[in-house]
């Protein structure tokens, strides 16, 4: 029996951006349409509504969805079934055709790459809409890109979706439109765009607070030398990679201290209106994921769910966690993209992956809003590149072809070398050794601005930030962070005054010691944030837009990474605006 045509009147109400994009799609009626929308905005619902419209009016007879992972195949099929569109998530290349009980199938990019002719024949047999989810994956390899192009050229309609920055390479993505700009470079063009800033303004996504932790790290190199560095301080990429690895070592002190803080934040959220709030730890590999799960059980007394790979039981474990009230989930890369667990509200970014694409995918797991006022908190190492990505949450990137550029993001090859155990045996085995690491809250990043001064883990100063209310609007988050920072600095001034007034200083008090570079940067960040807040109250412009305008005028990275000279220039500039 043929699958029934979905009933449009039973479809859930669309959000404003979805209605606008749907009207634009139906007005154009073009073969190809690209929609870029931030994670959590509702790309799946938008795409399924288009599929329902085209099935209902006879434009297409079948739907094929191409997803990045096996788990997302199941997720797509379940979402489609809820609106009356039946998709076969178990379709195999050997099946050649779907059963008549289905409107179509969900496949992966890998499936299409292995047998593009199978999918081309399916596409030619019936008038087909192809939905290419996270279309940037079609550029992951030449095989996948060529396979997608060969398989779906005969499609009547193609809908491309992405929720993350496009990749930084020169491989054109099939069916994406490129236009040449004034600089002669080709840039991808989206037909509908709904960014994180738009979604935050519409209360579609949660405000995200990034809690960046630094600390002293010590390790032994493969040459036997012992090195020490403060995480987050300027240094070579090799040293950053090794300090980073030392901090993430499950056997050290940095991860237990950060996990304890993250669990405390999770408790605050659960007690403040999100009783089922869950946490996700993103690990670099399976061995460390298991170790982090043991740490969580030791620290909290509760077992963590563990999803190690895209294997047969992974989807069931994710679904079980999503429907439960279990506190923690530990995963490697599988839960980084597209996986829908709306109750996730606390994240620990304990992975070496650092490209803008991966970072945006990972943070996208925490931004889905279920009710007004929910916030998300993500704990991460105070690594300069990650701080920059956290400060640029609202950035929208196009795919640029032919642009001379540095490697995207931090040099992941260096980090991978530092992360990798040596394969030699005997005395040469595991020559890199993490010796010790301590954690302290370095700063809180929100809306492009940096708040707070250094606070040791486990101190009342750290608890002031971990205890921020869980249900807040974006404006309330900014106001509270500014207030917390002012209180923290006032307490530091009181302590300094008390020390200066001690009886031992009956003689002429010595002049205060000069501030270190780190102290000057904190003071300048505080002054810049205060000036930006004042301009926000005068003009109504969001803090992030003011910071972005200062970066445009003065150059340089986000304030979390800016040098003393760059901060001073921005302070002088904002005073003239």
Image (spheres, rainbow, N blue to C red):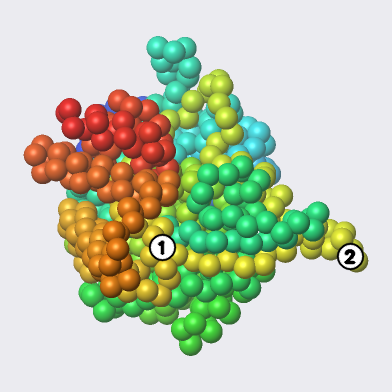
As drawn, the residue found furthest toward the left would be: 538
Q: Is mark 1 on a helix, strand or loop?
A: strand
Q: In this view, does 178 lie above or below 9?
A: above
Could you classify mark 2 by the number of other residues whose Cα lies within 10 Å: few (under 14), some (14-19), or many (20 or more)? few
Taking 518 as reference, is 16 left or right? left
Q: Is residue 463 above or below residue 41?
A: below
Cβ atoms at labels 2 and 1 below 8 Å apart: no
Nearer-N-terminus badge (2/1):
2
Percent coordinates x, y for residue 436 in the rendering = 62, 68
As drawn, the residue found furthest toward the right would be: 426
Q: What element carries label 2?
A: helix
Q: Which residue is drawn at 23% across and 75% down?
A: 272
Q: Can the viewer see residue 555?
A: yes
Please tell me the numbered disc located at residue 427.
2
Q: Mark 1 points at which residue?
A: 441
Q: In which quarter of the image is the C terminus?
A: top left
């Amino acid at each position: 029996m043929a699958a029934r045509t979905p009933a449009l009147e039973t479809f859930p109400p669309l959000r404003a951006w979805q209605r606008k994009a749907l009207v634009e799609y139906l007005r154009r009626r073009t073969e190809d349409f690209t929609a870029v929308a931030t994670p959590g905005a509702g790309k799946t619902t938008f795409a399924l509504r288009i599929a329902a419209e085209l099935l209902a009016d006879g434009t297409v007879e079948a739907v094929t969805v191409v997803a990045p992972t096996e788990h997302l195949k199941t997720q797509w099929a379940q979402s489609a079934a809820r609106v009356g569109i039946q998709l076969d998530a178990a379709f195999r290349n050997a099946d050649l055709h779907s059963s008549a009980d289905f409107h179509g199938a969900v496949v992966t990019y890998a499936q299409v790459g292995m047998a593009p002719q199978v999918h081309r024949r399916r596409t030619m047999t019936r008038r087909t809409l192809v939905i290419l989810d996270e279309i940037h994956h079609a550029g992951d390899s030449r095989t996948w890109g060529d396979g997608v192009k060969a398989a779906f050229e005969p499609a009547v309609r193609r809908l491309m979706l992405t929720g993350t920055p496009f990749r930084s390479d020169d491989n054109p993505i099939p069916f994406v439109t490129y236009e040449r700009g004034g600089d002669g470079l080709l840039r991808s063009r989206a037909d509908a765009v709904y960014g994180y800033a738009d979604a935050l303004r519409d209360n579609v996504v949660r405000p995200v607070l990034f809690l960046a932790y630094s600390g002293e790290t010590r390790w032994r190199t493969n040459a036997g030398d012992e090195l020490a560095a403060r995480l987050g301080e300027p240094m070579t990429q090799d040293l950053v990679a090794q300090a980073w690895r030392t901090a993430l070592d499950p056997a050290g002190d940095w991860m237990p201290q950060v996990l304890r803080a993250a669990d405390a934040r999770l408790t605050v959220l659960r007690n403040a209106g999100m009783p089922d709030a869950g946490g996700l730890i993103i690990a670099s590999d399976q061995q460390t994921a298991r170790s982090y799960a043991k740490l969580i059980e030791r620290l909290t007394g509760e077992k963590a769910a563990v999803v190690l790979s895209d294997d047969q039981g992974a989807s069931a474990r994710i679904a079980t966690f999503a429907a439960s009230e279990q506190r923690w989930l530990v995963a490697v890369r599988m839960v980084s993209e597209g996986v829908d667990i709306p109750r996730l509200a606390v994240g620990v970014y304990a992975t070496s992956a650092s490209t803008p694409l991966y970072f945006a995918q990972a943070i996208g797991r925490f931004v889905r809003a279920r009710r007004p006022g929910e916030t998300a908190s993500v704990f991460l190492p105070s690594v300069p590149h990650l701080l920059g990505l956290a400060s640029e949450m609202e950035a929208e990137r196009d795919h640029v072809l032919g642009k001379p550029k540095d490697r995207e993001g931090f040099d992941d090859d260096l980090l991978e070398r530092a992360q990798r155990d040596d394969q030699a045996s005997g005395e040469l085995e595991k020559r890199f050794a993490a010796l010790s690491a301590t954690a302290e809250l370095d700063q809180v990043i929100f809306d492009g601005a940096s708040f707070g001064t250094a606070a040791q883990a486990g101190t009342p100063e750290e608890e002031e930030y971990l205890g921020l209310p869980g249900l807040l609007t974006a404006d309330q988050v900014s106001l509270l962070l500014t207030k917390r920072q002012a209180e923290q600095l006032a307490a530091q001034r009181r302590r300094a005054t008390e020390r200066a007034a001690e009886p031992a200083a009956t003689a002429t008090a010595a002049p205060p010691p000069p501030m270190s570079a780190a102290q000057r940067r904190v003071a300048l960040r505080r002054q810049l944030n205060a000036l930006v807040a004042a301009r926000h109250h005068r003009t109504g412009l969001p803090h992030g837009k003011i910071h972005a305008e200062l970066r445009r005028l003065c150059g340089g990275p986000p304030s979390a990474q800016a040098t003393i000279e760059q901060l001073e220039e921005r302070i002088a500039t904002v005073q003239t605006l």
